Amino acid sequence: MVQNTSAEYMIYKDLRQKILTGEIQDRERLVETTLASAYQASRLHIKSALRLLEQENLAQHILKCGFVAKSLSPQAIEEIVELRIALERVVFKKLAETITDGEIAQLKKIVQRVAVFMENDMVEDAMEELDLYYSICYEKSGLERIPAILDVYTDYLKIIRRRSAEDKVQNLASLKLLQDMTAAMEKRDVETLLHHIERRRSEAE
């Protein structure tokens, strides 16, 4: 995939991350002159970046007031989770048919690291390992278009996972789910694996 490195796109990506993480609050004004100064960019670049955010429903243009940020709504989170599950059913079904013993071993090591990090309350480290786990699964599936679509939503999925990461009970449930998914892949048990994929809805509850 060709990476867009234009000025407006890089500004858009940074603002997007700040909105998703809550660094920029819901309904906070996105003042073009202030942003242009902060990013040392032209107002044209800032306006283009804000339009990209608007297309993604992460910003809203209000007549005579300019742009304001829009955080993820509960409905948006639900839609993203449903989309992820639908696409991951295809990815993991293919993966269970093609994954090698070496790749299974790699995933099992990641699961072990997640367990250690969670036991020691190293939540961010555990989340980074989870991100790596799913990234490897998408790559090793051998599919092209679906992982590319999921990649668009990577930032959203990370935010959703991290929102639930403060709940220790939820963390243990996520770890158990990861272990069960890996065991099903090792057995090439597609039906059980797809059942576990459906359980992932609880991550966003």
Image (spheres, grey):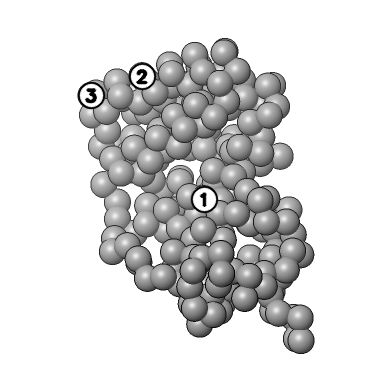
- Residue 32 lies, in percent from the top left, at 62, 75
How crowded pointer 1 is (Cα within 10 Å; few <14, some 14-19, many 20+) is rated as: some
- Residue at (51% x, 65% y) in the render: 39
User: Which quadrant: the N terminus?
Assistant: bottom left
Precedes in sequence: disc 2 or disc 1: 2
How crowded pointer 2 is (Cα within 10 Å; few <14, some 14-19, many 20+) is rated as: some
Q: Nearer the viewer, mark 2 or mark 1?
A: 1
Q: Helix or strand or loop: what does disc 3 sit on? A: helix
Residue that label 1 marks: 155
Mark 1 residue type: Asp
The foreground one among 84 and 111 is: 111
Left or right side of 123 for 13: left
- Residue at (48% x, 21% y) in the render: 114
Q: Nearer the viewer, mark 3 or mark 1?
A: 1
Precedes in sequence: disc 2 or disc 3: 3
Mark 2 residue type: Lys
Q: Helix or strand or loop: what does disc 1 sit on? A: helix
Q: Helix or strand or loop: what does disc 2 sit on? A: helix
How crowded pointer 3 is (Cα within 10 Å; few <14, some 14-19, many 20+) is rated as: few
